[in-house]
Image (cartoon, helix red, strand yellow):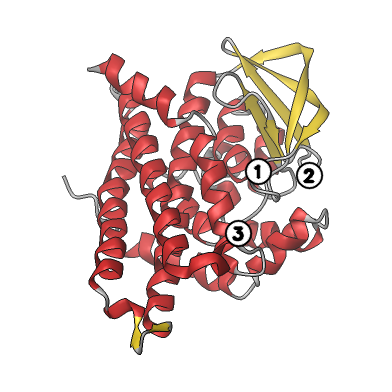
Amino acid sequence: MNFEIDEQQRDFAASIDAALGSADLPAVVRAWAAGDTAPGRKVWQTLTELGVTALAVAEEHDGIGAHPVDLVVALERLGAHCVPGPVTESIAVAPVLLASDAQRSAELAAGELIATAAIAPESPRAVDAEFAGVILVGRDGAVSEGTAEGAHESLDPSRKLFDVNASDDSWAADVQRAREFGALATAAQLIGAGQAMLDLSVQYAKQRSQFGRVIGSYQAIKHKLADVHIALELARPLVYGAALSLHADSPDTARDVSAAKVAAAEAGLLAARSALQTHGAIGFTQEHDLGLLLLRAQALRSAWGDTTAHRRRVLEAL
């Protein structure tokens, strides 16, 4: 099976990189963490113009109805650029939960509605509920609208978590499929964040000198960064494979999605550790862009199911 993306998908990823690369995302993320979401809203408008917010919305609701692999390609780039907001929830989960609601699905596609979601036990709290236009609460094959209650600080200051109170009115939805999309989308972002941390580390290792030599010339640094590259390259096909399983509604979907989430989370953790060791203490300061990625990767590792829960699902499927 060929897990390489095609030329059109590579061009799509490049267009996202070009647009987000000129948006000064580190400044946007810092502003978001400080409570100023105006620059972030402009980024989300850019995502709408690129078609990202319409990817998972059905064509009959004015969306693109794209293949899940296309969704993974886009979300990997959003993870690399550390885009703030309920990325997984609005772009990947909400289209499933709102599939029977033509009007709000069309609003999602057009960027007029940004949604967040809470589905226990994987994601019991809603991310960035104060930014979203609707909070969706999934439970037992049904979805309700929710209201935000207490706010909780995340490891990542740009990802605020909220307790939610679900209303009594509900509608039927494929909540389990929404869960799978949540885990898949998070895995894709972890791959993107891991790759971005690796790229920053390689660049830094070529510039930083120690004992009269650039640190990238030392075998210890070379091997450490090579291990990260290998981990990412092994995890990425699992994420694409999980997207294929979701598209085919395979009976192995749960196993494949969980395997992808575990591999992406472990690769992201290795990338974070190696990046911090390569950069030294400067990498963990919020003044350095690497610090934003370190915190985002750590927050995403436990989002939509931690590695323990997903390993258990893989074991149960064997």
- In whole angstroms, how far apart are the C-alphas of marks 2 and 3? 20 Å
Q: Earlier in the sequence, mark 2 or mark 1?
A: 1
**Gap in angstroms between the C-alphas marked 3 and 1:** 16 Å
Position of the N terminus, as image quadrant, is top left
Taking the spot 51% from the left edge, 54% from the top edge, the residue there is 79
In this view, 275 is above or below 58: below
Q: Position of residue 167 (x, y in %)?
A: 79, 15
SS type, badge 1: loop
Residue 263 spot, x, y in % from top left: 33, 40
**Residue at the extreme front:** 211
Q: Which mark is residue 292?
A: 3
Circle 1: residue type: Pro
Q: Quadrant of residue 271?
A: bottom left
In the depicted structure, whether residue 156 falls above or below residue 30: above
Indicate the position of residue 168 as horizontal and vertical percent values.
78, 9
Q: Secondary structure at mark 3?
A: helix
Give the distance between the C-alpha atoms of the residues marked 2 and 1, in whole angstroms: 8 Å
Q: Residues within 10 Å of mark 3 (few under 14, many from 20)?
A: many
User: Label 1 near label 2: C-beta < 8 Å?
Assistant: yes
Q: Residue type at mark 3?
A: Leu
Which residue does the numbered mark 1 point to in the structure image? 86
Q: Which residue is mark 2?
A: 131
Residue 133 numbered mark, or none: none
Picture quadrant of residue 143: top right
